[in-house]
Image: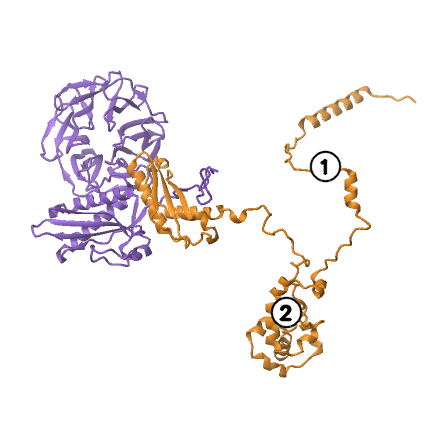
Amino acid sequence: MIGTGSTFAVLGSRPAWAQGRLRVEQGEFQPLPIAIPNFVPGSPADTQVGADVTGVITNNLKRSGLFAPIDQAAFIERITNIDVAPQFANWKTINAQALVTGRMTRQGDGRLKAEFRLWDVASGQQLTGAQYFTAPEYWRRIAHIISDQIYERLTGEKGYFDSRVVFVDETGPSERRVKRLALMDQDGANVRYLTRGADLVLTPRFSPSTQEITYMEFGQGDPKVYLYNIETSQREIVGNFPGMSFAPRFSPDGQRIIMSLQQGGNSNLFVMDLRSKSTTRLTDTPAIDTSPSYAPDGSRICFESDRGGKPQIYVMPAAGGQAQRISFGDGTYSTPVWSPRGDYIAFTKQGGGQFAIGIMKTDGSGERILTSGFHNEGPTFAPNGRVLMFFRDPGGNSGPSLFTVDVSGRNEQRVPTPGFASDPAWSPLLS
Amino acid sequence: MKLKVDKTMVASVALHVLVIGWGLITFSARSLEVVPEALPIDIISSADLSKMTAGLKNGEKDKPKPLVEKVADARPVDEAVGKIDDKKKEVVTSTSTAEPPPKPVEKKPDVKPKEEPKQAEKKPEPPKPDPIAEALKADEAKKPKPKQEAKATPPQPQKPKERVFDQSRIAALIDKRDPTRQSITGAALNPTSALGTATGNSDTRVANWMGPFVKRMRECFNFPYNGQDADQFEADIDIRMQPDGTVGVEPTIVAVRGPSKSVATAVAESAKRAIIQCQKYTFLPKEQYESWKYIQLTFGLTEH
């Protein structure tokens, strides 16, 4: 008997001792309670870095919306040695389902050694554990890597904490706003500026495979697409096209850049091979085709076009060809971005005086609005495709800020930035 | 006599009747058709019926199945007696050891000590002695207390000496409780179990523990996932249970399904943790251990 909609069902007929499979559907999702005591210092001098690493891990997991770190004030047991198993009863008492213990030790050569263990409180088993060595100034990165390990072990998915975000930093009054290209950790820390603000920069995009950025800059002449290497701080112009080139984005292998070129009142899509510098036209329509984005396997692209009258999202083969419209809701759709997982396309939707950030499946079905308001725009996916970052401008004399929201739309978080910030683009995982 | 008929009137009446009649038929609310449930029936002839209801003049007379009050004299119902016996016994012993006072109230001082309880129904009086004494002392009509007090206060046996018999307060000695023997309607017990029919299997059904078990699992199973494809992930887990409601050996992952194998495996591991975390399952009925010593579960995610 199979009970549709019931909490369980018995499948098939079995012998008396085996009553058939009972179906257990997960109840209302609750973030997983996890206990993260301060990492034990290898020496008294390591106490601060131990607490700092713990703080970063706690913040990462909490912001993901999938975990609920337990307040340290509730802890019963104090971890003093990570080489012996904790007293799990003490952690069960505070309803922890997972426990992270760790140790930070300064080595004789000046490097920092980070060790951690992830425990399953119910069974008392160690789920994972690792140790890392790094220069002391990279303690934050170690914390992100450990966060990813925990995330991956408990969810089965790659993490996204050891990643960076490039964005447009905005300062000054709204009529004379200075826009600089800036880079930061995904949690808003370690901000560093890549340009000086002399020229207007827009739409920075990370390479999916290298530590390079492509962006559009308004210089003396027409706006041009540039390529910027984060590690060498060198930049180069991408092609030398007549007219304006804009909305650049890398191909999944990082070897090509797809972008829009304006010709007259129209704009079409072009792809440029970064090695051969050869350019290929992908669309040729009397319309505005822009904001192209590759599928992670590189076989297709999604883009925005007003060829049907108003901006909508289309999908077509990466080499060009028949484009298929996939957005059919009320309003207009723009800035489509293909998820690194390949399952969703994120977009900005405008209608009814609102700007919303949403996702839909790649065939246009399952549209889901994740956040809506006066002005939300520019979604970018985290490397694991489970979280999006976007910017929100409240209007008036204020300026835009960055936010993250998970693909369920339940967990929205503001990303701290030094000033106003817009147009974020998430990097791939650093490790 | 000539009747003058107004033709228009006739026509009007006729038309009204027609219209109303048609309306009644057409617009009348039709009751929902109830499809009669098929019931098994036996057809018997009227002769049979009258034969059944007529009775036999020479038939064996019904053995009187008197109510317990009467039957009790002749054939006490063992079980019933047993039940009441305990109480009464204590009352008797505690009140006044072997004192006759209680008995006088009874109609039949039986020889069998065990039979007494039967009459005990009528003789909740045994405790009387104490209530009376107390009532007189404290001026408090407290007759329901009897049994308990009698039990609770063994020292009372000494009280009898102080007792004063007051006829005017005999009413206080009457047991005003409802008879407790109503459930016994005769000497013979119904051969059919009151818990179900002879072919019933309610006692062997296992659905009664499945609901609570699945509910408990749902409470414990919490997998951190937020994708729209959540409902595509499933994990089959088998558990061997111990009779005390604990999980015997580590739950076995039989199969996992889903768009991502790593996520599906994590779902299965999370389910295993939930199973271990939630033990022990003391609500599982021990007498049905055979039905739950080996439990097969399928864990699934739901999209939120």
Q: Nearer the viewer, residue B38 or A101?
A: B38
> Mark 1: which amino acid?
Ile
- Residue assigned mark 1: B43
Q: Is residue A331 above or below residue B172?
A: above
Give the CA distance from mark 2 to mark 1: 51 Å
Q: Quadrant of residue B74?
A: bottom right
* Residue at 67 percent of width and 78 percent of height: B100
From the top left corner, tell me how far across and down residue A88 is, in percent.
29, 55
Q: Which chain is indicated by disc 1?
A: B
The quarter of the image holding the N terminus of chain B is top right
Relative to A315, is A163 on the left or the right?
A: left
- Residue assigned mark 2: B114
From the top left corner, tell me how far across and down residue A27 is, in percent.
39, 44
Task: Pick out the residue farthest to the right.
Answer: B1
- SS label for mark 1: loop
Q: Which chain is indicated by disc 2?
A: B
Circles 2 and 1 on the same subunit: yes
> Mark 2: which amino acid?
Lys
Q: Quadrant of residue A41?
A: bottom left
Q: Nearer the viewer, residue A130 or A199?
A: A130
Q: Which chain is purple?
A: A
Q: Is residue A225 above or below residue B211?
A: above
Colour scheme: by chain
Q: Residues within 10 Å of mark 2 (few under 14, many from 20)?
A: some
